Amino acid sequence: MNAMLKPETALPVEVPVRRPRPALKVNSVARAREQVSAAAVKVIAPLLGAALLVLVWQIITIKNSNFPTPLATWHEAVTLFLDPFYRNSPNDQGIGWNILASLQRVAVGFGLAALVGIPLGFLIGRVPFVGSMVGPMISLLKPVSPLAWLPIGLLVFKSANPAAIWSIFICSIWPMIINTAVGVQRVPQDYMNVARVLNLSEWKVLTKILLPSALPYILTGVRLSIGTAWLVIVAAEMLTGGVGIGFWVWDEWNNLNVPHIIIAIVAIGVVGLLLEQALVALARAFSYEQVAN
């Protein structure tokens, strides 16, 4: 009897498996590229912009020999900032004292505008009758040029320094009033309904509902106002005289010292930028989510 044959079994064949690249390595490479690209945008792009500005500046000096070159202006700036706080006479002081004097006027005028403008904005936004009564006056006075208010200040205060502060006050108050009123008016009606159901006092409504909700609008108005205040003080000091960065620019023009004028323009821009960035950081610190919690 023939033996039963066992079926032949096929030998297993090894199929090469393509191993995928590690995802961690791919992610790290992509992340490194993103970091290099972000660094290029933050560092290289501003440097290229500054280089382009200096190049245009140099071309202008070739066409106009009275205009100082970038190198000559740099040497003047180094000399000027080596001793920014010298004081030879009331009309001959370093650029540091002039900037501090302007900042002091801005602080007083801006602070007074905040003390008046923010509460008035809350009142306008909270009481429709007051908004209807004051709204036309704000629309009429807001477009008036800052320098148009300076003679009124000189007439009332009989002095240049209070007149400059008055110009800052009257021109920086409008953004705070308008933005605060808009912020109060845009508080969700559901919040006010809950306050009415809970029978909250007006002080509780103000501190617990209106202020947290309107705070981003208030800070936006404050940012706009500080830029306006710094812009106004330079123009006002050119007309009123005394110690201040605006008067310093005008005095250097009378002396035909163009490099110092350019240095002052850069200093004014840097101070304005620092003020703006400080308020931006303040706005980020008091975001809506953080205030609401």
Image (cartoon, helix red, strand yellow):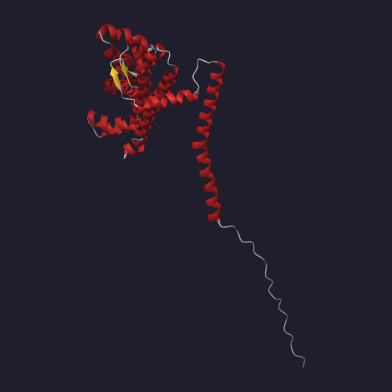
Which image quadrant for residue 159? top left
Residue farthest bottom in this picture: 1
- Dividing the picture into quarters, in which one does residue 225 lie? top left
**x then y, percent, for residue 274:** 38, 29
The x and y percentages for residue 161 are 28, 14
**Quadrant for the C terminus in the image:** top left
Query: Going by the image, does 260 lie left or right of 114?
Result: right
Q: Is residue 289 above or below residue 264?
A: below
For residue 236, side relative to residue 14 (left or right): left
Q: What residue is at 29 percent from the left and 34 percent from the top?
A: 194
Q: Nearer the viewer, residue 187 or 43?
A: 43
The one nearer the camera, 7 or 50, is 50
Tell which of 251 and 78 is nearer to you.
78
**Where in the figure is residue 219, as x and y percent of width and height?**
35, 28
Residue drawn where x is 37% and y is 27% of the image: 81
* Res 93 visible: yes
Q: Quadrant of the N terminus?
A: bottom right
Residue 154 screen position, x and y as percent: 28, 8
- Can the viewer see residue 142? no
Q: Residue at x 36, y 31 (%)?
A: 278
Q: Say above or below: 282 vs 259.
A: below
**Furthest-top residue in view?**
155
User: How many tags in the picture?
Assistant: 0
